[in-house]
């Protein structure tokens, strides 16, 4: 009985880490969208910022994915959380960069 309870608890923790990773990814995208809106909100700005988010996400997955496969095999939840946290940080940095733009 203890094993089933522990399994359900670890499954719940994994789900919450995956959900938190996706929330972080959404926050990263939000940072890019807000930065595009702040610099004029043109179609070009949105296209470039969203493309930048996609490219940064692909590069993040390409770097963190193999690390996750090597160091925490079978723990995709940790990989999603790490990529999401990195994207949230990068989205925040991109948003802050709008304050340094001259125009």
Image (tube, helix red, strand yellow):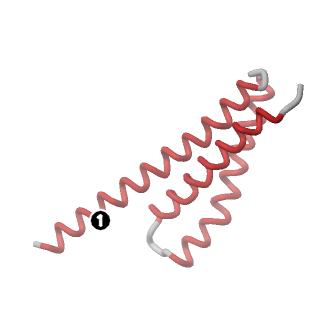
Q: Position of residue 17 (x, y in %)?
A: 41, 56
Q: Position of residue 97 (x, y in %)?
A: 76, 39
Q: Residue at x 78, y 21 (%)?
A: 40
Q: Is residue 1 left or right of residue 15?
A: left
Q: Is residue 30 left or right of residue 50?
A: left
The residue wearing badge 1 is 10
Q: Residue at x 24, y 68 (%)?
A: 7
Q: Is residue 84 left or right of residue 62?
A: left
Q: Residue at x 68, y 37 (%)?
A: 32
Q: Position of residue 6 (x, y in %)?
A: 21, 69
- Within-10-Å neighbours for mark 1: few <14, some 14–19, many 20+: few
User: 30 and 54: which one is in front?
Assistant: 30
- Quadrant location of residue 46? top right
> Which secondary structure lies at badge 1?
helix
- Quadrant location of residue 74? bottom left
Q: Is the N terminus in the top left, top right, bottom left or bottom right quadrant?
A: bottom left
């Amino acid at each position: 009985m203890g094993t089933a309870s522990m399994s359900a608890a670890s499954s719940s923790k994994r789900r919450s880490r995956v959900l938190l990773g996706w929330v972080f990814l959404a926050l990263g995208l939000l940072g890019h969208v807000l930065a595009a809106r702040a610099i004029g909100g043109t179609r070009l700005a949105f296209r470039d910022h969203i493309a930048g988010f996609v490219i940064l996400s692909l590069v993040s997955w390409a770097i963190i994915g193999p690390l996750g496969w090597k160091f925490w095999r079978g723990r995709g939840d940790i990989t999603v959380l790490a990529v999401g946290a990195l994207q949230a940080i990068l989205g925040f940095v991109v948003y802050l960069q709008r304050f340094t733009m001259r125009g």
